[in-house]
Image: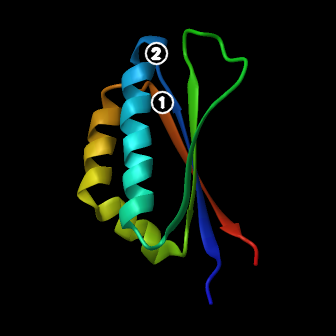
Amino acid sequence: MSRQLVILVEFRLPATNLPRFLELVTANARQSLAVEPGCRRFDVALEQGRPEGEPLVLLYEIYDDEAAFQAHLALEHVKSFLAAARTLVTAQSVRRFDLPA
């Protein structure tokens, strides 16, 4: 059996864009958990102590495996979120981890 896949995504964005971004990302997280059998966890967090000018939003996602993550990326709600997010963020990074058994 393959190990579960952990995805960490960091978004930096202007504070003025934060309310709209949080609305979009939390809807995406809820939808992912509701309709994707391979999506086990999808948390949205804000970094503490950041300067108000450029907040950092962290996504912590767990998928059954690589195939489940690729299926996630192919869904329309994810594509729509990513397209909208591009207009709101100034930087984005993605890191991948294996979750030990």
Q: Nearer the viewer, residue 70 or 46?
A: 46
The quadrant holding residue 61 is bottom right
Location of residue 51 in the rendering, given as x and y in whole percent from the top left corner:
65, 11
Q: Residue at x 49, y 36 (%)?
A: 92
Quarter of the N terminus within the rendering: bottom right
**Residue matched to label 2:** 14
Name the secondary structure under disc 2: loop
Q: Point out the frontmost of discs 2 and 1.
A: 2
Q: Residue at x 46, y 15 (%)?
A: 14
Decide which of tag 2 and tag 1 comes sooner along the chain. Answer: 2
- The residue located at (57%, 20%) in the rendering is 55
Mark 1: few/some/many CA within 10 Å (<14, 14-19, 20+): few
The three-letter amino acid code for the residue at tag 1 is Ala
Q: For residue 85, what is the image quadrant?
A: top left
Element carrying mark 1? strand
Asked if the residue at tag 1 contacts the one at tag 2, i.e. Cβ–Cβ closer than 8 Å, the answer is no
Q: Decide if residue 43 is on the left or right side of residue 28.
A: right
Q: Is residue 28 left or right of residue 96?
A: left
Residue 96, percent across and down? 60, 59
Give residue 36's mark. Answer: none
With 13 as the anchor, is 31 left or right in this view?
A: left
Furthest residue toward right:
101
Residue assigned mark 1: 91
Which quadrant: the C terminus?
bottom right
Residue type, label 2: Pro
Where residue 71 appears, as percent x and y from the top left, is 36, 70
